[in-house]
Image (cartoon, grey):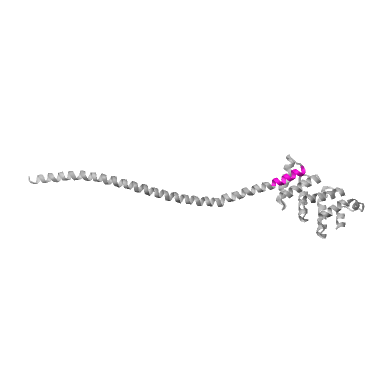
Amino acid sequence: EDEMPGMIEVAQATVTIIPTMQGAQQTITKEMTGAGEVAGTAAGEAAGTSMASSLGSTMSKAGSSLTKSVTLPLAAVGAASVVAWKDVDAGLDTIVQKTGASGEALESMGDILNNITATIPTDFSTAGAAIGEVNTRFGVTGQDLETLSGQFIKFAALNNQDVSTSVDNVSKVFAAFGMDASDAGTMLDALNTVGQRTGVDVGSLAQLMSANAASFREMGLNAEEAASFMG
């Protein structure tokens, strides 16, 4: 009987202690959870900042790389295209000024312009001048115009002459000797031969030939023979 009060006191103490610890556990859990949330938030912000910084750096490098490898070359291509089109346009403008061509006729001459500049080392302005002058002076079109224009461009370049002046001088020789456009290639070869052999200026030679054509013809000389005679 003496032991019973002791057991009751122990039981009461146990009952009292357990609720007290349960409150403490809730407090501890709450505190730890709060601290964990703060730490987690801080860690998340730090990681986000680091990731954003890393991503920003990567994107910056990628942007720089794209600028160098893509944007700049594309800009260069674009600039080159603008320059090329301006050159083509200048050649077409020259053709229009010299011939007054439009519509299908101008389109055909534009094709000839592109063909000549793609096969002969010359610029669009020179090619346009040759096409315009040859069409006007000799009245040829199509393939004949392309062939003769190319021959005059080569002739002018070989003799360091302006192509428009060359066409003008030679066309006067043709008119003076009653020649046809089909004889142009042979005549240009004859002038080239004399010019290269003697060093005489082919422009001056052509002018003298046209000025004295009547006398040469009275002598029974044709244009080629007159060129050789004067050389």
Q: Main secondary structure of the magenta part?
A: helix
Question: Residue shown at 68%/46% (left/top)?
Answer: 86
Q: In the image as oriented, which residue stretches furthest toward the right?
A: 218
**Is residue 194 on the magenta stretch?**
no
Question: Residue shown at 60%/49% (left/top)?
Answer: 75
Q: How many marks?
A: 0
Closer-to-camera residue (126/219): 126
Position in image of residue 145 (x %, y %)? 77, 46
Quadrant the C terminus occupies: bottom right
Q: Is residue 57 left or right of residue 177?
A: left
**Is residue 93 on the magenta stretch?**
yes
Position in image of residue 156 (x %, y %)? 77, 53
Q: Is residue 51 left or right of residue 183?
A: left
Q: In the image as oriented, which residue stretches furthest toward the top?
A: 103
From which residue to which does the magenta span run? 88-99
Q: Is residue 21 left or right of residue 193?
A: left
Question: Residue shown at 29%/45% (left/top)?
Answer: 30
Q: In the image as oriented, which residue stretches furthest toward the left?
A: 1
Quadrant the N terminus occupies: top left
**Quick check: 103 above or below 214?**
above
Position in image of residue 46 (x %, y %)? 40, 50
Position in image of residue 162 (x %, y %)? 77, 52
